[in-house]
Image (tube, rainbow, N blue to C red):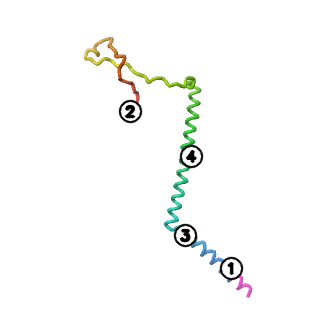
Amino acid sequence: MFRRTFWFTAGAAAGVWATTKVNRKLRQLTPESLAAQAANKALEAGHRIKDFALDVRDGMVQREAELGEVLGLNTDPELPSPRRVAAIENSDTTKYRKNPTYVERSTYSYNRNEDH
């Protein structure tokens, strides 16, 4: 008699446990729950990417300071004035001259990245 009662109670407990587990899993798989989980994961990923970008920026600043110190660039904090190249006077005879004339106050500025 006690055996039957034990197994009946054990079976009922297992049924309640399984029903609870299945209902919990079904609630996790509803569209609203899936959308909330996706949004949470996207926020976490965004925070991780932001932290990574900030770490990279800090590393860049630190490395730039180290390179500036090694190269001696930090001695004078003022930036040099932009470089200007004297433009050659545009005339037909310029190519045939040995000493072409230069225009010193030209508005032409040299930008080595201009063609890229």
**Where is residue 11 shown, x and y percent of the image?**
66, 80
Amino acid under disc 3: Arg
Residue numbers of the magenta segment: 1-7
- The answer for how far apart the CA atoms under marks 4 and 2 are is 32 Å
Which is nearer the N-term, disc 4 or disc 2? 4
Dot 3 crowding, Cα within 10 Å, few <14, some 14–19, many 20+: few
Disc 3 target residue: 27
Q: Tag on residue 10?
A: 1
Nearer the viewer's eye, disc 1 or disc 4? 4
From the viewer's perspective, tell me whether residue 55 is left or right of residue 85.
Answer: right
Outermost residue toward the right? 2
Give yes or no for contact between labels 1 and 4 (Cβ–Cβ under 8 Å). no
- The answer for how far apart the CA atoms under marks 3 and 1 are is 26 Å
Give yes or no for contact between labels 2 and 3 (Cβ–Cβ under 8 Å). no
Amino acid under disc 4: Asp
Q: Tag on residue 51?
A: 4
What is the secondary structure assignment of the residue under circle 2?
loop
Give yes or no for contact between labels 3 and 1 (Cβ–Cβ under 8 Å). no
